[in-house]
Amino acid sequence: MPKPKLELSELVREFGDDVFSCNETTLICKACSKTFPNARRFNLTQHAATSSHQKSVVLLRRRQEEESRLEAAACSPDLPSFPMDLCGAFLAADIPLHKLENPTLRNFLEASTSRIIPNESTLRKFYVHEIYQRKMQTIRESIGQSSIWISIGETVDFMGRSIAHVVIGALNKEAAGRPYLLNCEIVERTNAHTVARVFYKSVEDLWPNDVQHERVLVFVTDAAPYMVAAANSLKVLFPNMIHVTCLAHAIHRVAEQARTIFPNVDRLISSVKKILLKAPSRVEAFRAVLIGVPLPPKPILTRWGSWINAALYHAEHFEAIRSFVNDLDSTDAAAIGEAQDLYRLDSLRQDLILISANLHFVPRTITLLETSGASLQESLQHVRDFEAMINFTRRQKLYPVKQKLEFVLSRNTGLESLRQIQGVLEGSLRLEESPIASALSVEQVPKFKFAPIVSCDVERSFSVFKSLFRENRNGLTAAHLKEYIVIACNQDQ
């Protein structure tokens, strides 16, 4: 009569649950990373007698002892330096900590450093938070006693959740302060209440003991109505704060107005893009005909001014691209026929001439405004230059572009306040002529010398966020996500 088969859990207890584990069908040797489907006692007896297993058990127990020691040390004020440095290096290089569970990598690191490599869970539970706390302390020390500017923006991750980022920087008269990502919050919905809550929670993180309401001088956001409403409500608590909506975003809205004026140009850009999309043979033919000419740029909704760049490209290479498109067979794709019809329109040439002659400076102005660390004088001069060039009359086709610019600037009340302060700073405006500057102290007014008027630093942090939090790395909790992104965006320069 055959002996009854033992349950896997009984074999684990018999041979040691510190070395073996099991699931419903398979027994696993944790020391050797080897599996035993439907294992019996003699399988484990033979395996346990091998010299390789015995060496692996010694290493496993050393690692378990080291893990216990590290976890015990994590409860003390001074954490061991090697695990801290290892964790910091992985976070700085955007290497997921679970990669440490790879046996080849772990063995290599242990052999190279002569150290026991901590478990991923140990680093995540104890060391990530400590690195985050040290990073926050570095930000507080960098800000010191300076006044600050704050910028808030929101995006949507691949899971459809709304994410709010808060970026701050010091305001000093000597030089522009470095921008720091202070907070990353998952919000249920984007409205004035949630923006105000994230704003206040962030300044509490910056000043945990006592919020310095009078030291918040500039608040930069986009022009969404809920952002404006949140800023208006926050002014009650932060009396010195000036809210300005992003000027780079405003000029992008002006560029989008141009897009509506020239529908045929928009259709041409779209159809040429479709002609070359997923068509290697056409791309090869394009490069053979237009030697040295890059492929047409693709307008991206989230990249400011990219449509104007695409239109300028088609204006510069109009004849060459038209010749290439007309040589294609219109029956191959609907986009080819559409593009050939558009190239027959005399009005298309006229539209591209208007864009090339009158809107070529739009992308350049956006790029200038996006420059980090620019002075308030330089930024406002770029805006004044842009206003001077958008000087169209009612009889011109581009007049709606001028109307759009006047509309977005008229709603940006903070811009006028900063213009008054800049006038006081350069001496072209007397202090009593500026109610805004008069309400500030003599010490505070010079701190506006490097005040930002764009929210580009928030947009840059979104790029880091989307690189870090991706579809194959979606197991981070909200708390860990905040810590990871704050560490990643505030690397030492």
Image (cartoon, rainbow, N blue to C red):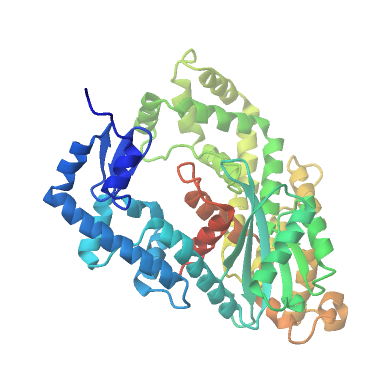
Compared across the picture, whether 270 is left or right of 256 comes to left
x, y (%) of residue 192? 79, 54
Q: Would you say residue 245 is visible in this rendering?
A: no
Instruction: Please name the residue shown 82% across and 44% down the image.
Output: 394
Residue at left offset 20%, top offset 62%: 111
Residue at image x 62%, y 41%?
Answer: 160
Residue 327: give x, y in percent of width and height: 44, 20
Q: Hey, which residue is sitting farthest bottom in the picture?
A: 442
Residue 380 found in image quarter: bottom right
Q: Nearer the viewer, residue 187 or 82?
A: 82
- Quadrant location, the N terminus: top left
In the displayed image of the protein, which residue is found farthest to the left?
A: 51
Residue in view at x 37 percent, y 74 percent: 81
Where is residue 359 shown, x and y percent of the image?
A: 64, 48
- Location of residue 364 by image quarter: bottom right
> Farthest top residue?
331
Is 321 on the left-hand or right-hand side of 100?
right
Q: How many marks?
A: 0
Query: Taking 351 as reference, is 162 above or below it?
Result: below
Q: In the shown orientation, is residue 208 left or right of residue 231?
A: left
The residue nearer to you, when weighing 114 against 266, is: 114
- Quadrant where the C terminus sits is bottom left
Q: Position of residue 413 (x, y in %)?
A: 81, 62
Q: Considering depth in this image, is 153 or 374 the residue closer to the camera?
A: 153
Q: Is residue 136 visible?
A: yes
282 to 476, vertically: above or below: above
